[in-house]
Amino acid sequence: MSLPIAKETATPVATALPTYAAEDLTKGGGQAHIVLGDQTYTLRITRAGKLILTK
């Protein structure tokens, strides 16, 4: 009679990512500009509370 062998499950290590509130990025408004390299993007909070990022 053999005993059951417990299998280890790999749990991914959580990586701490920077977290920002959209309202902080827009300073309480509905839009903010985000610059990446030489490109400027517009972040917009919709009336439905969704985020849209456009070039």
Image (spheres, grey):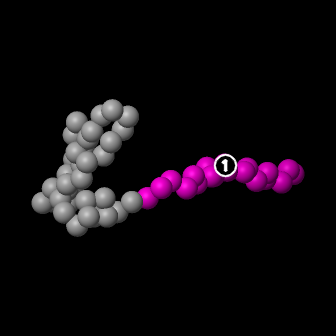
The residue sitting at the bottom extreme is 28
- Name the residue nearer the viewer: 38 or 1: 38
**Residue 35 x/y as whole percent:** 33, 42
Please state, as top left, top right, bottom left or bottom right, where the C terminus lies in the image: top left
Is any part of residue 42 visible from this angle? yes
Please, is residue 5 above or below residue 28 in the view?
above
Across and down, in percent, residue 16 comes to 55, 56
Q: Name the residue under label 1.
A: 10
| Location of residue 11 in the rendering, given as x and y in whole percent from the top left corner | 63, 52
**Magenta part, dominant SS:** loop
Which residue is at a point 76% across and 53% down the rendered structure image?
6
Residue 9 counted in the magenta span:
yes
Q: Quadrant of residue 31?
A: bottom left
Amino acid identity at mark 1: Ala
Q: Give the range drawn in magenta.
A: 1-19
Mark 1 closeness class: few <14, some 14–19, many ≥20 residues within 10 Å: few
55 over 29 or under it: above or below: above
Secondary structure at badge 1 equals loop
Q: Residue furthest top?
A: 38
Q: Name the side, left or right, on which 44 lies relative to 15.
A: left
Which residue of the protein is positioned furthest toward the left in this rendering? 47
Seen from the viewer's position, the closer of residues 20 and 5 is 20
* Horizontal arrangement in the rendering, residue 40 relative to residue 30 (left or right): right
| Residue nearer the viewer, 17 or 2 | 17
Q: What percent of the width, then of the height, locates residue 24?
A: 31, 64
Q: Is residue 55 magenta?
A: no
Does residue 22 show up?
A: no
Which residue is at a point 67% across and 50% down the rendered structure image?
Answer: 9
Q: Which residue extends farthest front?
A: 38
Q: In this view, does 10 lie to the left or right of 6?
A: left
- At 83% from the left edge and 54% from the top edge, which residue is drawn? 3
